[in-house]
Image (cartoon, rainbow, N blue to C red):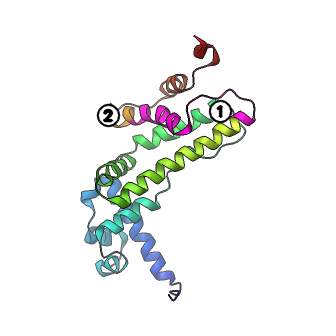
Amino acid sequence: MEDTPFDPRAERSRSAILSAAAQIIGEEGYSGVTHQRVAERAGVGRATVYRHWAQLDDLLFDAIATLDAPIFRPGDGESLREWLEAELSYAGAMFASPTTQHLIAVLVDRGASDAALAALRTEIGSRADDRLGCRLAKARTDGESTPTPNATDLAALLLGPLLFRALMQPQAVDDAFIASVIDHALPSPKRRKA
C-alpha cells in the first residue's frame, strides 16, 4: 500500500471538520450532526466532509475519539488524597459541562449498538483505570496507606457519585462533596478497623 503524501490543506480541513463535529455533538448531541451542518461550521464544502467521511457514524466516532478529556491525569509530588481531590475537582467540572454531558450520552446510547463506540467507551474506562492504578502503585511505593479495591472498582467508587451528581441531580460537585466521596472510597485506617 502506497503512502499518501502529506497535504497540509487536507489536514487543516480534516482538523476543522473534527472540531466542528465535536462542537455540534457537545451543543446538541448526536442528532444535531449532519454533513451539511459540519461543513458550515468548519467553513468547508460539504463535498470535503464527504470525501473524508462518507459515513456519518465514522465522522462521529473520529470526532469523539479525538477529544482528550483525560480522567485521572498523571500527577507527582502530592499525596494520594491531594491528587484525588485535584482530579475529582477536574472531573466534576468536566462532567458538569454540557459538551461532556452530550458526549457521555452519545457514548452510552450509541455504544449500546455500535461496536466501535462501545470499544471507544471501554478504552476510555481502561485508560482511567490504568492511570489510577499507576497512582495507587506510586502511593504504595511512597509508603502511603492505599485502599483495598482494585483500580477498576475504585474508579467506579470515585467517579460514579460525581457522574450521578452532575447528570442526574444536577448539582455542583464542590469540595465538600469531593471530600465525602474520597472518605467513603478510601476509608482511613481507623474507619477500616471499626
Instruction: Return the residue at label 1.
Output: 80
Instruction: Return the residue at label 2.
Output: 168
Image position of 130 with respect to 36: above or below:
above
Position of residue 105 measured from the top left corner of the image (x, y, whole percent)? 32, 48
The stretch drawn in magenta includes residue 152: yes
Q: Residue at x 35, y 59 (%)?
A: 115
Can residue 71 be seen here? The reply is no
Which of disc 1 and disc 2 is earlier in sequence?
1
What residue type is disc 2 on?
Met
Left or right: residue 135 compared with residue 112: right
What residue type is disc 1 on?
Leu
Magenta stretch: give its range: 140-163
- 173 or 51, which is in the foreground? 51
Judged from the image, the secondary structure of the residue bearing numbered disc 2 is loop
The residue at the far right in this view is: 142
The stretch drawn in magenta includes residue 148: yes
Image position of 123 with respect to 45: above or below:
above
Q: Residues within 10 Å of mark 1 (few under 14, many from 20)?
A: some
Position of residue 50 measured from the top left corner of the image (x, y, whole percent)? 31, 78
Judged from the image, the secondary structure of the residue bearing numbered disc 1 is helix
Image position of 48 with respect to 57: above or below:
below
Between the residue at mark 2 and the residue at mark 1, the CA separation in whole angstroms equals 28 Å
| Secondary structure mainly formed by the magenta segment | helix
Q: Residue at x 28, y 54 (%)?
A: 28
Q: Give the image quarter of residue 168.
A: top left
Left or right: residue 179 compared with residue 162: right
Q: Residue at x 43, y 34 (%)?
A: 160
